Image (cartoon, rainbow, N blue to C red):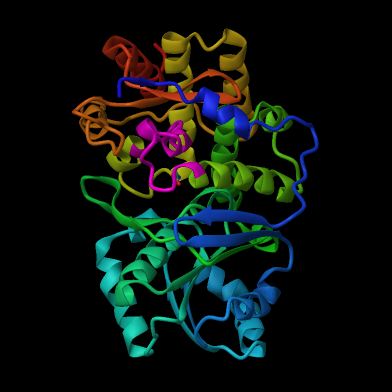
Amino acid sequence: MSVKLLAASLTKLSFETSVPVVKDDIEVKNRSGSYKIRVGPGLLAEAGTELAKLKLGKKAAIIADESVAKLYADRLQQSLKAAGFEICLSTLAGGETSKDMSRITPLLSFLARNKVERNDTVLAFGGGVLGDLAGFVAAIYLRGVNLVHLPSTLLAMVDSSVGGKTGVNLPEGKNLAGVFHPPQLVLSDTDTLKTLQRRELTAGLAEVIKYGIIADAELFAQITDGAPADLTPVIMRCVKIKARVVEADEHETTGERALLNFGHTLGHAIERVAGYGKYLHGEAVAVGIHAATLLSQRTLGLPAEDVEAIKKTLVKNGLPLQALGLNITEIKQVLAQDKKVMDGVNRWVLSPKIGKALVTSKVKPADVDAVIEEVLTSKK
Ligand code: GLY
C-alpha cells in the first residue's frame, strides 16, 4: 500500500451538527460482542451495580495507580462491596517508566495469589499507562480474564481505554509488545479529573486536538481558544469518534485505525529518545502533531490557515510545539522502527484539511528532515 486515501471512509465520522453533547452511553462493537462506555460524574459510585449487570465472576481484582488509589479506592471499593463483590487491590506507581515487562510478573502473581478465576474481572483504575499494563495482565492471565477500564485521566478517557489495545514498551520502542484485549465496560468518572495535575490534563488535550484534526472540524473549532471547563461533552465526542474508528478497523489492518496515530510517529520517537517519562505522552504527541501538520502542508497542501490554526490551538491549550536537545540521528533510527513501517518504509498520518486525515508513504525524505529540524531544534 503506497498511498491510501481514507478521507472518504472518514466522512461518515464527521459530525454534521454543532451540538457538542453526546448524551447517551456509547456502545462499541467488536469481534467478540460489544461493550459500553459511560462518561460523566459520580460513576465510581456506580461501578458495583454496573459490574453486577455484566453477570461475571464474583471477584473484582483492582489494579490501580497508587496516587489515584489514595484518593478514590475507598469510593470504588464501597461500591463494589455493596454489590457483593470480593475485592483484592494492587497499586503501582504511574508514569511511562512503569510500562515495562518487569511489572507484569508481579501483577500476574497478585492475581494468582488471590485465586482470580477465568470469569472474574480485572479493574484497571488509573491513567493510560496503568490501563495498558493492567489490560495486558488481564489479557494473558489464564489466557484472558474480564477487563473493566476505570480511566482517571483525560488521556485515558479519550484514547487508551477505548479500543482494546494493551501492552508495554520495549527498550527499542513504545508499545512494541502487547495484545488486543477489549474491555467489558469502560466507566470514565469525570470527577477524577478535578484532582488531576494540570500538566496531565494539558497533555490529554493533545489527543482531543488530534481528534479534531483527523475527524471533526467542529470539535477543533470549539477548542481553538482552549478547552471548556466542563470536559464531559468533549470527552464523549472524542470517544464517539474513536469508537467508530475501532469498530471499522479493530485490529489496525485496513489503515483506518492508524489515523488515530496522527502526531504519534514522531511523538513516540521523542518519548523513546528523551527517555520514557521525560515528556508525558500527550506532550510528545503535541510536538508530533506540529510536525505532522508541517509535513501535511508540504505533502498534501494543508492550507496555511489550517497550519496556523493548529499551532495556535496547541499553544492556547498549553502544549509545546518543539522538543529541544534530542539527538536527531537517534530520532531517525527510532522512526525507522515505528509500528506503521511497511516494507521498510515509514507511513505517515497526514491531514489535507482540518477534519480529515489519510495515511501515506509518499513523503519526500527531504521534507521529513526539514520538519524534524524545525520541531527539534531552536530557531537560529
Ligand atoms: N491510540 C491509538 C489506538 O488506540 O489505536
| Residue 21 image offset from top left, x and y in percent | 77, 45
User: To which quarter of the image does residue 118 belong?
Assistant: bottom left
**Residue at 36% over, 40% down:** 253
Quadrant assignment for ligand 1: top left
**Residue 98 within the segment the image draws in magenta:** no
Question: Residue 184 at what x, y percent from top left?
Answer: 52, 67
Residue 18 visible in image:
yes
Frontmost residue, 275 versus 354: 354
Q: Quadrant of the N terminus?
A: top left
Residue 42 location (% of width, % of height): 73, 68
Residue 259 is a magenta residue: yes
Image: magenta residue range: 248-268
Location of the C terminus (image quadrant): top left
For the point 65% across and 62% down, which residue is it? 192
168 relative to 351, above or below = below
Instruction: State the image coordinates of residue 80 (x, y, percent, origin top left).
Output: 61, 83
How many numbered tags mark residues here?
0
Left or right: 227 in relation to 275: right
Left or right? Give the position of 298 relative to 97: right
Query: Can the viewer see residue 314?
Result: no
Q: Tell me what residue is drawn at x 21 percent, y 45 percent.
A: 172
Q: Is residue 144 left or right of residue 32?
A: left
- What residue lies at 48% left-to-right and 39% top-to-bottom? 283
